[in-house]
Image (spheres, grey):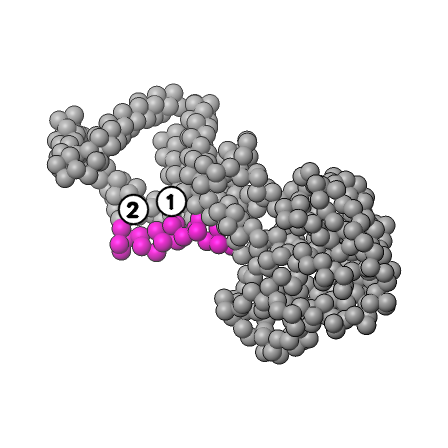
Amino acid sequence: MPVLTLQALTVHGVGPVDLTVAAGEVAGLTGPSGAGKSLLLRAVADLVPHGGEALLDGVPASAMPAHRWRAQVGWLPAESPWWHDTVGAHFAPCPGVDFTVLGLPAAAGDWQVSRLSTGEKQRLALLRLLCRGPVALLLDEPTSGLDAAATRRVEHHVRGYLTARRAPVIWVSHDQAQLARVADAIYILEGGTLAPLSRPGHRSAREGTNRP
Amino acid sequence: MNVIDLTPLDLALAAVLVLALAAASAWLRLGLGRQLVVSGIRTTVQLLLVGLLLKVVFDADRLLWVALMAGVMLAVAGREVMRRQQRRFAGPWGYALGTVSMFISAFSVTVLALVAVVGTRPWWEPQYAIPLLGMMLGNTMNGVALALDRLTAAAWERRDVIEARLALGETPARATAGMRRDAVRVGLTPIINAMAAAGIISLPGMMTGQILAGAPPWTAVKYQVLIMFMIAGGTGFATLAAVALGARRLFDARERLRLERLHAA
C-alpha cells in the first residue's frame, strides 16, 4: 500500500508543503499559472534542489539513488520530449505495449516522432511512463492538448492504473471540472501555500457522474 | 646537415607578402588590414621570444627548466580550452576540466614516447621533450575544446530530454550516452581526418620542417608517423577524460541536471 508523503517540502518560494496521498487516491492540484505547481512536482521527483523530504511508504527519497526514486514516482511533464526517431524505440523497456487503450492505432510504435501531433505526444508520453510501472504518479496537465473524448479516455485509463496498483497520484490541472471528476481531494497552490480547496467525497460516490 | 640559415632580410622579404595583402585588404575595404599586420607582428615577436627561451632551456639542459616550460605550456593550453567554449563550467572547474584532462593524457603520452620509443638520454632531453609536448598539447587542446563545447551545448539545448529520461528512472550516464558519444566523436574527428589525409592531401608541417632542415625524408617520415600516433592517443584519451569529467559535473550527487553550473561566455 504505497503512500506518498511530502514533509515540509520547499522549493523556490513554494512551501513548506505538507501533503499525504493515500494508496489509490488522487490529490488534485490547481492554482494560478506560475504558482509553482509544476515546480512542486519536479521537486517531488527530486529533479530540482529542494528543502524537506518526499517519502514513499515512509521511505525518504534520500535513502535511495535518485534514479531509483524517480523510477518509482513517475513524473509526467506537461510537455514531453522525444529523443529517438521512432515512437517504438522509446518503448524498448516494455515490449508489447498496447497503444489502443488510449485510442491510438496498434501500429503507433512504427510512427516517426517528428510527425506526432501534440495530442498524440501527450497520450504516448503517458503510456511511456505507465508501461515502466511507477508506484506513484505525478501528472502535470496530462490532458491539456486533448479533446473531450480523448480526455475521458486518459482519465479512465489512469484510474484503471491506480486502482490496479493502488498508486497514489498528484494530478495538476487548470480544469477544476476535471479535478472534480478524478480527484479524491483538491488543493490549491497560491502564493507559495498549499490549501485544501474542497473534498468532493469518495470516488465511489462519483462513479455515476462519469458521463454527464 | 646543409641548412641554409635565413637572414633578417630574407624574412623582411617574406613580410612584404603580408603587407601587400594588408594593402589589398585596405583597398578592397575588407577591414582585415589592421588584424593582418598585428597578427604578423605577434607571430614574429612570439616566435622570437620562444626561440630565445628554447635556446636558454636547451643550453641550461636541466629538468627543472623543462618542467617549468611544460607547466607554462599546459597552463596556456588550459586557458585556451576554456576560452573556446560557448558555455563553460563556472568557477575553477571551467579551467580545471580541460587542463587536468590534457595533463593526464598529453604528459603521459609524451613521457611514454620519450622513454619507450625515442629513448632519449636523459629522457627529458629538451630538444626532443619540448617540441613533442608542444605538438601534443596543440592538438589535444583542439580535441578537448571541441568535445567540451559540444557536450555543454548539447546538454543546454537538450535539457528537457535529459530531464525526461532521468524522470523515467534512467541514470545520468544513460541519459547522456548519446551526447557524450557525439562529443568524443567531434573531438577526435580532426586527428582522424589528419591521419587519413597525411601525405596524400597534406604534407604534415613537422615532416616538412625536418626535410627543409636537411633531415633524410625517411627519418622525417618516421617521426611524423610517431607524432601522428601520439597525437591520436593523446587527443583521444584527453577527450575521453574531459567528456567523462564534464558529463559528471553536469549532475549533482542526487543525479539532477545542474545547468546553472554553466556560464555563457
- In this rendered view, identify the residue nearer to me: A190 or B151: A190
Image point (57%, 46%), residue name: B247
Q: Picture quarter containing residue B230? A: top left
Image point (86%, 68%), residue name: A204
- In this rendered view, identify the residue nearer to me: A66 or A153: A153
Residue A80 showing in the rendered view = yes
**Quadrant including the N terminus of chain B:** top left
Chain name for mark 2 = B
- Residues beneath discs 2 and 1 located on the same chain: yes
Image spot of residue B6 (x, y percent): 17, 30
| Whether label 2 touches label 1, CB < 8 Å | yes
Label at residue B227: 1
Residue assigned mark 2: B204
Kind of residue at disc 2? Pro
Q: Is residue A81 above or below residue B73?
A: below
Image spot of residue B148 (x, y percent): 48, 44
Q: Residues within 10 Å of mark 2 (few under 14, many from 20)?
A: some
> Which stretch is magenta?
B180-202
Q: Residues within 10 Å of mark 1 (few under 14, many from 20)?
A: some
Kind of residue at disc 1? Ile
Q: Picture quarter containing residue B51? A: top left
Image point (31%, 55%), residue name: B197
Q: Tag 1's secondary structure?
A: helix
Image point (77%, 67%), residue name: A159
What predominant SS class does the magenta segment belong to? helix
Image spot of residue B96 (x, y percent): 53, 34
Q: Tag 2's secondary structure?
A: loop
Most distant residue in the front direction: A212
- In this rendered view, identify the residue nearer to me: B58 or B85: B85
